[in-house]
Structures are given as C-alpha cells and as structure tokens.
Amino acid sequence: MDHTSPRIALVTGGTGGIGAAICRQLAADGLTVAVADRDAAAAEALARSLGPAHAGFAVDVADEAAVEALFRAVEARLGAIDVLVSGAGVLLLRPDGSRNLLAETPTDEWRRTMEINTSGTFYCCRAYARRITAARPGGRVVTISSVAAQLGGYRSSSAYIASKAAVLGLTKALARELAPFSVTVNSVAPGLIDAPMLRLSLDPADDARAASQIPLGRLGTPEDVAGAIAYLVSPAAAYVTGNTIDVNGGYRMQ
C-alpha cells in the first residue's frame, strides 16, 4: 500500500442509509471513496457531496461480470483499491412488512436474497482478493452481516438470516487466506439501526417498544455502524481479523 497518497475505499450499497454514512465517515477520515450502488445517479450525487476526489459508480452486485467491471472502473479512475466495504444487501418482505415463514418462502425470494447478500459479497471479496499481492500489504475488507444471523432474527426472513450467516463464514475464510498478505478481514453485525431497511418492518410508532428491549435504550444510527467500520479499516485495527463487531446497543451480548 502506498502510504504517501490517500487510500482508496470501495463501498458497495453506498447510497443506502448505512452505506451513505460509511462513505461520509471514510471520506472524513481522509480516504478517497468509490461510492457504488445500483442507482448510478444517487452514487454520483453522494460522491460529489463528499468532494472532488471521490467518484460514484453503478453496480448490481448480484451480477458477477458487473462486479468485475466495477473493480476495473474504480482502478482506472481512482487507483488500486485498498479498502473494500461490502455493504450491498436486501431484505425482501411482504407488502405489509411481515416476513414469510420458511414454509411460505417462494424460491424466487430465496434466490434473490442469496444472489445479493451472499453471492454479491462473494463476488466483491473475490475480486478484491485476486488483486492482493505481497507488494500491497495493509489492505482491509469489511463485510456487513446482521444481528439476525446471530439470533435467528425477529423481523427478518429465513432467507435473509441464512444469507447473512453465510457472510460471517465467508469473512472468516477470507481472513485466513489474506492474513499472509497482512490484509485484515472483519464483519460488522448491526442490530436495530434506524435506516430504510429497518423501516420495512418497524413503524416509527413502535420505536419506544423496540428500544425498550435494547440495554442502551435506543435504536442505533447509521453513524454508529460507520464508526465501527472506520475503526476496522484504520491502522489501529491492524491486529484484528476474522472477527465480528456487534453494533447493537447490547441487544445481543457475547
């Protein structure tokens, strides 16, 4: 890694509630951010708001070829990618915000959830790993899982829970594989975060009831998650790999 110039960070799902907070935090910390999202216009607008050094890119992480094209485009415009934050994800629910039980889950729902949450993370991590060499130590990968993967979930579907549990296993496997290159790989598992995905299943009128089940007594914010990621990609976390940081206000303790 070239320490004389800003590190390049690629954030997928970069315009979502949590993704945008991650992009803003990393930019504030001095990284050059490649904001990647299915919505190209939104990605470009967020990148412009971060400053002229940053750039927006379109990608559907469920498309293997599109992910490879994304990495090439970021490298051509910004340079070699030092930090990958694989944040693109989806939670598919019924129109009324309820979840399908396993016995009711359509195959299409299962496949689409896995394509984005699990395969999308795999495609991004693989593209990153293929570019790592001994000449570029100090890289960082952060995946996004969920407290639902650890608890079985209460508002999440079985497909979502399974997809995010797979991300935890993938993170550990990649952490071992990239350790010889001094690259760390960790995951962040958000709890109840006040972001658009949570609002699919939680009415704001029920916030107080939901918060009463959390020891810290409040819902999390996207900035809470971004702070954990900022630590994991920083030099201070150089000896942390294969771990999951829970950002859940004590909703799950280990």
Image (spheres, helix red, strand yellow):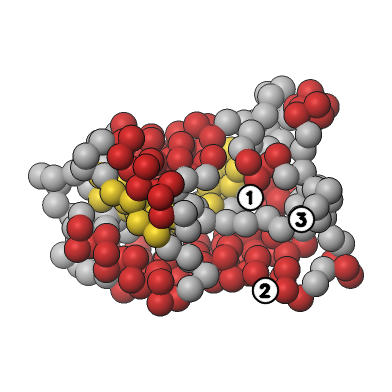
Find numbered disc 1 in the image and state the secondary structure of the residue it sits on.
loop
Vertical position of residue 221 compared to residue 15: above or below: above
Looking at the picture, how far across and down is residue 94, in whole percent?
Answer: 81, 55
Q: Residue at x 35, y 56 (%)?
A: 57
Snapshot quadrant of residue 202? top right
Q: What residue type is labelled 1?
A: Ser
- Badge 1 crowding class, 10 Å Cα cut-off, few under 14, some 14 to 19, many 20 or more, is many
Q: Mark 1 points at which residue?
A: 146
Look at 19% across and 63% down and name the residue there: 76
Which circle marks residue 111 in the picture? 2
Is any part of residue 235 visible from this angle? no
- The reply to whether residue 112 is visible in this rendering is yes
Q: Which of the two residues, 101 or 204, is positioned nearer the viewer here?
A: 204
- Residue 177 x %, y %: 39, 70
SS for dot 2: helix
Callout 3 secondary element: loop
Given the image, on which type of amino acid does mark 2 rest?
Arg
How many numbered marks appear?
3
